[in-house]
Every structure is written in structure tokens, then in C-alpha cells.
Amino acid sequence: MTNQTLAADVVVVGGGAVGENLAGRTAAAGLKTILVEKDLVGGECSYWACMPSKALLRPGTALAAARRVDGARQAATGVLDREAVLARRTAFTSDWKDTSQVEWVRGAGIELLRGTARLAGRKQVEVATDEGAIAIEARHAVVLATGSAPSVPPVRGLDGVPFWGTREATAAREVPRSLLVLGGGVSGVELAQAFARLGSTVTLVARRGLLSAYPKPAQRLVEAGLRADGVDVRLHTATESVAREGDGVRAQFTAANDGGTGASAVSPVSAERLLVATGRRPSLAALGLEQVGLVPEELRTDATGLVAGCPGQWLYAVGDAAGKVLLTHQGKYEARAAGDAIAARATGSLAAGGEPEPWSKYTATADERAVPSVVFTDPEVAMVGLTLEKARERGLDASATELPIAVAGSALHADGYDGWAQLVVDEDRKVLLGATFAGPDVSELLHAATIAVVGEVPLERLWHAVPAYPTISEVWLRLLEEYGL
């Protein structure tokens, strides 16, 4: 075993999309940056989450879209080619090889270390590699960009049966005959629909409803879409136990009675595969946070990513590790802000102890006010900013304007187009606080809403943003008319 000691301006622990973005930012600013990754460079999103899951979903969505248009419907008479879908998915993961990502890292002037890192003290990082231990001293900052890990529910018998997490599902080499999905969040509903359209018999079980962070009309449209694809959707149902059954699993459930008291048994489900998609949590275990006086479960950051309660202003956390918004695009945004803040503090152009103004290049202000998210089911759900309930919880005088998406553009887009849209308005300032769209292909409406929320565009000015005809974006005009403009 060899032991080395290195020095760098910035050490980034975690080489996923978020860590790459931050390291790229600090390296471009002239700071010597070391990136430490124990797995594939590019991280969860590239190989097991965003990209492969959407690659699994897209062929089914494209086929369904053709079948919603008369004339195309008659030509779209076949079924999905499973092998081709899986091969296309694999292509998007580069067959789980990170050669191109490593080339980008090195081309950006970032030093890459393969190994497992932990904090050893103030600005001290220890990395265990196959060749030995490496100690690194960071002159300016250490950044935790370690992503998140699956949350496994306390279901009796689960530790004794083989099951998929989202990693195994998105990397599947075969489509199971039957699939039981536990979890009604984004990953659960997306993968349930993907595998149903690939030919699996799918049952989805959720302790509460589907997509609880989204407005109920959007939830209902997604539920209807799942059921139309043959998914057995069981809501407000608790998984009591799972056990092996032949080469598969068998699960037992209970559901709340109509009166909301007690519980009653419901029919069990047997499946070839079990997918547990019940959420994720920041991956902070075994990082040595205790060595610098921090409790992993209590880690908090300011708007620049600086970790609270760590003397010396040197430790940062971004992306899922920071626990604010567990979305790749938002983590990359946090990384850009934190990288710029680190570089500015290194040169003294930004005070070490002060927090910059909101909406500056050093702050991830949108985390609190304008987070965009998309559920890539069919129909899609696209949302940014605050729901009506969240706005009122913050003490804002907010109203909601909503209506079906029924414009010329949607009628042309699909026969029998079924969609829904909502704007949430700050009545004191007359600006948008949030927007939600649900329906086929509504994700492309989202960035306009994000710009309106971030820019705090007054409704009277937004009225002059004329949507092109005939597009689905005409729903913006109808919403503003419904509001009263």
C-alpha cells in the first residue's frame, strides 16, 4: 500500500452531474480542483436515473402519440420491440462505461481520483484507492456532491427477498412477465408505465396517493393514464409483508376502511419482480462529518452551498447531498452558484462570512421559489414554483386560476386531448408564484412558466406575450383571460 499527500484549492467529493458542474466551474476559474469518485463519473442521472428511465419511457410515449392521431393511428398497429427499446436505453448509458465523461473531466483541467473519500479534519480529505491511501489538503473548499441513496421502507420480510431498486429497474436486461411497484412518487409511476408498455403485468401500490407534491387534477390524469395502460393502481394501501414465492415474490397489504379507522386486508399480489421506489435521502453516511463536528441528518446549507455550523467557512454541499431539492437540474444549478461563490471567496471578491444578495450568481435562490419539475409519464406533469397550498402556508395572498387544456393547438396535437393547467398568482404583487400543466407533451410549456416566475413578470406585461397559433401554448392566453385580463 502506498500513501500520498496532495494539495488542491478545491476537493469535490462525488463525480456525478452535480460534482462535475462544480468542479468545472472552479477549474475554469483557475483553482486547482480534484474530483473524487468511487463509481462511474457522471453519476446516478447518467447511468441509472434520468437518462435510462426516460429512454425506457420515450418509445411507448411516441407510439401512444401516433395512436392519438387519426391517420397515424392506422399505421401504428404493432407493439414495442423490447430488445430495441432496451438497446436504445443502453446506448444512452454508454453501456455503463464512463470513458467519455472521464475525457471531459480531464479536458476541463480537473484531476480525477478513483476512490472512496471521507473527511479527516478541517480541509482534510482521505481517499481510499486500490493503490493505497491518499491524503488531500484543500486550500479553499471541500464540496460534498455525493448524491442520494434509496430509502427502503420497514416492510416485514423485505430483507429476505430479492428486489429491484430504481438502479436495477433502469438497468434491466429483460422485461419481467409481472412487476409489483411499491411507491407512488415520480420514479414509481414512471417505471410502472414504462414496464407496462413493454409488456409487463404491473401492479402499483402506494401508501397514500400518487404524486402527492402535485395538484390533484394532475394526479388524476396520471392515474387515468396508468390505468389505461393496464396498471393495477392501489392507492392508500400499506404493504404489510413480502415473501419469496417460487422465483418471484408475494406481498400482503392492508387498506384503510371507508371511515378512516382501522385497516382491512386486501388481496395479495404475486409478481416475478418487486420494485421498491419509495423515495431517496441524502447520501451522507461514512463521509466523516462527525470528524468536523457535524451530524449528517442535521446538515444544512445557505444559498451559496456553505454548510452551517462548520467553523472556517470551507465545507460546502450541493445537489441531493444538500437535501433541498432532489432533482438533477436543480443540483447542477446549485453547483454553478457554489462554484462561483468558492472562486469569488478564494480571490477575496466575495466576503467569506457574508451571504450574497438573492438572485446573484452566487446564490441558488430558485431553490426556494422557482423549482421546475417534470413527471415524464403519459400524460406528463410539469410544474414550477409554488402550489396554491404552499403559497398560503407561506402567508401569501394567493389565488389559483385553472382550466382544461382545450385550445386549437391541443386539438391538432391529439384527438381527444385531455389536459389541465393552473396558474398561482400573488394577489398583492400581481405576479406568478407557480404554474402546473398536465397532459401529453406539456413539459415543453414549462420553461416559459419558469421564466415568468423567476423574472416576476407582472401579469399585465405577461398579457402581451402572445402565444403562436395554433399551439398548445395558447392555454396561456386562456388562463390569463380566465383570471380576468
Image: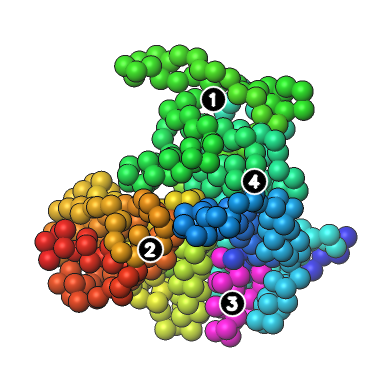
Tell whether label 1 touches label 3 (CB within 8 Å): no
Q: Is residue 144 left or right of residue 311?
A: right
Q: Residue at x 18, y 69 (%)?
A: 459
Which residue is under mark 3? Answer: 24
Few, some or many C-alpha atoms within 10 Å of disc 2 (few <14, some 14-19, many ≥20)? some
Quadrant, the N terminus: bottom right
Earlier residue among tags 2 and 1: 1
**Which residue is label 4 attached to?**
198
In percent of the image, x 51 and y 67: which residue is there? 332
Pointer 4 or 3: first along the chain: 3
Magenta residues span 18-37
Above/below status of 134 relative to 229: below
Q: Specify few, some or many for label 3: CA neighbours under 10 Å numbering under 14, 14-19, or 20 or more.
A: many
**If you read the primary sequence from the N terminus, does the residue marked by circle 3 or circle 2 appear first?**
3
State the residue position of label 1: 239
159 left or right of 463 in image: right
Q: Amino acid at mark 2?
A: Leu
Instruction: Say few, some or many: other residues with alpha carbon within 10 Å of mark 1 (under 14 / 14 to 19 / 20 or more).
Output: some
Q: CA distance from mark 1 to mark 4?
A: 25 Å
